[in-house]
């Protein structure tokens, strides 16, 4: 294998080894097989381009073109032209996949599922890094800067991945880079012959100090390579450590994190608690959804987005959970026994087009959800999560849920909590101030069971503790914020909910924090409108036999559950302790299905949603036209740019051989010289560079010899050379005919003797197209002399023996 071939193989291996650092991010890891295969094809194109050989930039452009085609075949074959070429539909599909992949990155926890969008980002990133590494290290023979894209690839993976095996991926990526440096070093040394091969060290020679033998010269580049490798490893180690902490979604757990809310003031699935405060402080209560429900007590109809069940001392966040396909019938809610009264209710919900949320707001516990689009089900929290970029924007869906109506006696006689659930949902961090547990004990003193303790906690925050509802308070969710809240007694729903949940855990009651919306406000047509200011957080406590149960500690917000009120009959919504807004809510709303629809069909969801007035049809603007046109223009540019030399050469050939203007001797001389230029350029394209120091006759003999021309082509080139001598040296040149046919015969003879690869090279990447660069260089020289511009680059200067 040649030195450059070994270098190309090392570049492929280095890219693949660095790509392995992303394996912990996605499950399954089969994407690496697809990426390795496509990367091998891309590198193979580079090897062929350099073997032809193509110009360096043209080789890189050919690899970029192949990369686009490979991604199109792998991810947009159905939309591509002839299943291969990236037409407008394929470009739109790829852009949509990238957009969906970006949404998936912010949604899923590590390891994320290998959705088409994430797979495209991974494979496309590997190919892009592989292109940069191959271009720098092999095409331009500069392996040291090729470590930068490898470092970027590893740094991104190291910044996202978690776990103790990070050193393994670092070692693998670093080894790939060192392998690339070693291959380049061997390639460079091999070009110097045996001088640097090293000789046997004489006996008794010292191994220290300066060595002037060949072996010392051989060791000097090795020592330099070691230094470069050490510096590169140090940078690769320091940069990931200096990256800021990232969390939320794929960056650290679905539902948690520290990112800003998305969707123009709506609650973000990545960090609902932070954006919740912004929603509550909006100057305008912008509508985010409307719904109709058959619930007998709409004041208790909370729309739940997700549950935050982990408290690490700094924040409440959702656990990393596995997603599955949405079942037709959702499993029974955990902990609910058949002895508890349950009413099935049916609701239709319509989300505004501007409300884009990756979690579907649902009443708890939902038993069946009918919704269009791509959604996934998370069983533990009983939530639906958008898949492949799916959001609630403009969504319409029907939900069948259970209105659980426990009595206070049933809650008081709740059974023992399963050990696993108790262990998971009663964990509190060591950083939790002792004042939290002490205050919880003081408040619940005298309570006989967990239910009474929960009610006492709720009453302490909502009525008896002297707390004030204030949305201007800092929305911190850590241990320090809890202590500050208990001291200042000012906050909003976030503070009330997570403080009550933390206290409940210190008392041995499983607890978590739910985030979503309160029931909203009733409309004259019987529907309900939910706005940004209805965003809310509340604690959910677990009681065996009843399941996860809502409590409402926030004063003036939402509705206090009937099972927490003294001597209140189950289902009674007209309690004086309820907020005024909920007391005025209508008792029942008209269900969305038609009144004439049979009950069985309504139960199966066959009546549709046409009876729900005010429901906006979902809109999907799709990818902006400007983006599609821009990407299409970029693809066209990538496809056309490598072919520009061929187009220029075809145009030049047609102009030279088709010239027929003028009958003056000067015109005949110009036509003859144009044909001669075409003959010499054709030979140049086939690997015979021009030597303009030779006479036309000597040039013809040279072309016949080096081009291995047959008799017909040799006679043709001699005829053209004779015509050139007549035009240049005869006193009265004789007009020549048939020169264009002779030039074509010479071209056919050169192609026949050169073989197929050389003919393809002469067609697609003609060497004579460098005359364009020479022409531009001349113009720059003139402008430099006139306007005193900086000197032109060395590579554009024309060789002295190839002047016109």
Image: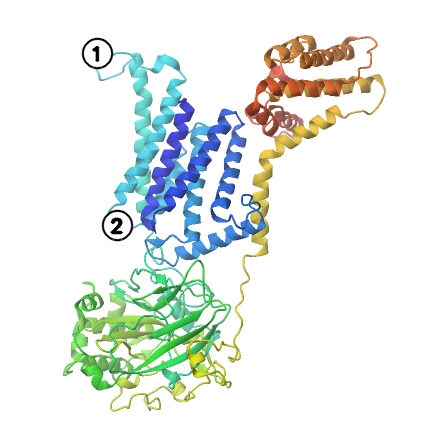
- Report, in whole angstroms, how far the alpha carbon at label 1 lies from the one at label 2: 50 Å
Q: Is residue 64 left or right of residue 689?
A: left
User: Tell me, what colour scheme is on the image?
Assistant: rainbow
Kind of element beneath mark 1? loop
Q: How many marks?
A: 2
Kindly identify which numbered label has been placed on residue 163. Answer: 2
Sequence-wise, the earlier of marks 1 and 2 is 2
Q: Nearer the viewer, residue 788 or 603?
A: 603
Depicted 476 relative to depicted 209: above or below: below
The structure residue drawn at horizontal position 66% and vertical position 28%, both measured from the top left corner, is: 649
Tell me: residue 688, above or below residue 4.
Answer: above
Above/below status of 20 relative to 189: below
**From this viewpoint, is residue 144 visible?**
no
Spot occupied by residue 435 in the image (x, y as percentages of width and height):
18, 71
Name the residue beneath numbered marker 1: 205
State left or right for residue 573 relative to residue 686: left
Q: Position of residue 147 (x, y in %)?
A: 38, 35
Query: Does the CB distance between marks 1 and 2 fall below 8 Å?
Result: no
x and y percentages locating residue 288 in the rendered image: 47, 72
Question: Where 51 falls versus 617 (above or below)?
Answer: above
Classify 10 Å Cα crowding around label 1: few (below 14), some (14-19), many (20 and above): few
- Is 294 or 572 nearer to us in this picture? 294
């Amino acid at each position: 294998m040649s030195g450059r071939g070994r270098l190309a193989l090392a570049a492929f291996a280095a890219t693949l080894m660095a790509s392995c650092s992303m394996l912990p991010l996605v499950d399954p890891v089969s994407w690496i097989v697809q990426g390795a295969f496509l990367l091998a094809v891309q590198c193979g194109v580079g090897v062929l381009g350099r073997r032809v050989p193509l110009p360096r930039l043209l080789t890189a452009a050919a690899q970029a073109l192949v990369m686009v085609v490979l991604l199109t075949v792998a991810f947009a074959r159905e939309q591509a032209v002839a299943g291969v070429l990236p037409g407008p539909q394929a470009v739109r599909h790829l852009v949509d996949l990238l957009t969906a992949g970006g949404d998936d990155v912010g949604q899923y926890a590590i390891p994320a599922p290998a959705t088409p969008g994430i797979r495209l980002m991974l494979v496309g990133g590997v190919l892009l890094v592989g292109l940069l590494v191959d271009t720098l290290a092999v095409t331009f023979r500069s392996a040291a800067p090729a470590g930068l894209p490898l470092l970027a690839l590893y740094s991104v993976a190291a910044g996202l991945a978690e776990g103790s095996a990070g050193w393994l991926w670092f070692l693998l990526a670093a080894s790939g880079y060192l392998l690339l440096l070693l291959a380049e070093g061997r390639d460079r040394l091999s070009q110097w012959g045996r001088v640097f091969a090293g000789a046997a060290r004489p006996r008794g020679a010292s191994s220290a100090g300066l060595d002037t033998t060949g072996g010392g010269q051989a060791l000097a580049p090795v020592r330099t390579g070691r230094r470069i490798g050490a510096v590169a490893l140090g940078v690769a180690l320091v940069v990931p450590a200096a990256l800021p902490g990232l969390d939320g979604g794929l960056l650290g757990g679905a539902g948690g994190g520290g990112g800003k809310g998305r969707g123009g003031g709506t609650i973000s699935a990545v960090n609902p608690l932070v954006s919740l405060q912004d929603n509550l402080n909006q100057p305008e209560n912008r509508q985010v959804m409307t719904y109709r429900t058959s619930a007998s007590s709409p004041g208790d109809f909370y729309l739940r987005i997700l549950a935050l069940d982990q408290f690490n001392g700094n924040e409440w966040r959702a656990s990393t959970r596995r997603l599955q396909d949405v079942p037709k019938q959702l499993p029974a809610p955990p902990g609910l026994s058949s002895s508890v009264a349950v009413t099935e209710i049916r609701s239709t919900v319509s989300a505004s087009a501007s409300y884009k949320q990756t979690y579907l707001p649902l009443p708890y516990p939902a038993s069946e959800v009918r919704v269009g689009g791509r959604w996934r089900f998370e069983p533990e929290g009983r939530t639906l999560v958008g898949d492949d970029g799916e959001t609630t924007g403009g969504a319409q869906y029907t939900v069948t849920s259970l209105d659980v109506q426990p009595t206070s006696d049933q809650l008081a006689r709740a059974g023992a909590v399963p050990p696993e659930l108790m262990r998971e949902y009663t964990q509190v961090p060591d950083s939790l101030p002792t004042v939290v547990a002490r205050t919880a004990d003081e408040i619940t003193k005298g309570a006989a069971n967990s239910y009474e303790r929960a009610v006492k906690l709720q009453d302490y925050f909502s009525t008896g503790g002297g707390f004030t509802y204030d949305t201007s308070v800092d929305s911190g969710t850590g241990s320090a914020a809890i202590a500050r809240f208990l001291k200042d007694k000012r906050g909003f729903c976030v503070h009330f909910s997570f403080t009550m949940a933390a206290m409940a855990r210190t008392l041995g009651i499983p607890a978590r924090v739910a985030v979503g919306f309160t029931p909203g406000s009733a409309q004259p047509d019987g529907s309900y409108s939910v706005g940004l200011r209805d965003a809310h957080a509340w604690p959910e406590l677990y009681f065996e036999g009843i399941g996860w149960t809502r409590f409402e500690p926030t004063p003036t917000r939402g509705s206090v559950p009937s099972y927490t009120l003294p001597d209140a009959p189950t289902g009674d919504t007209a309690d004086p302790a309820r907020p005024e807004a909920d007391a005025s809510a209508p008792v029942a709303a008209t269900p969305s299905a038609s009144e004439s629809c049979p009950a069985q069909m309504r139960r199966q969801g066959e009546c549709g949603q046409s009876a729900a007035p005010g429901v906006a049809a979902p809109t999907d603007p799709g990818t902006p036209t400007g983006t599609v046109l821009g990407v299409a223009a970029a693809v066209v540019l990538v496809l056309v740019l490598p072919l520009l030399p061929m187009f220029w050469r075809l145009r030049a050939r047609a102009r030279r051989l088709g010239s027929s203007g003028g009958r003056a001797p000067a015109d005949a001389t110009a036509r003859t010289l144009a044909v001669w230029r075409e003959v010499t350029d054709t030979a140049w394209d086939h690997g015979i560079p021009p030597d303009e120091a030779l006479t036309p006759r000597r040039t013809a003999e040279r072309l016949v010899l080096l081009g291995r021309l047959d008799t017909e082509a040799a006679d043709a080139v001699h005829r053209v050379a004779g015509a050139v001598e007549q035009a240049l040296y005869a006193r009265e040149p004789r007009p020549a005919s048939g020169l264009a046919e002779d030039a074509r015969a010479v071209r056919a003879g050169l192609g026949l003797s050169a073989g197929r690869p050389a003919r393809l090279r002469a067609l697609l990447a003609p060497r004579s197209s460098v005359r364009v660069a020479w022409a531009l260089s001349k113009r720059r020289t003139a402008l430099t002399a006139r306007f005193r511009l900086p000197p032109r680059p060395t590579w554009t200067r024309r060789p002295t023996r190839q002047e016109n």
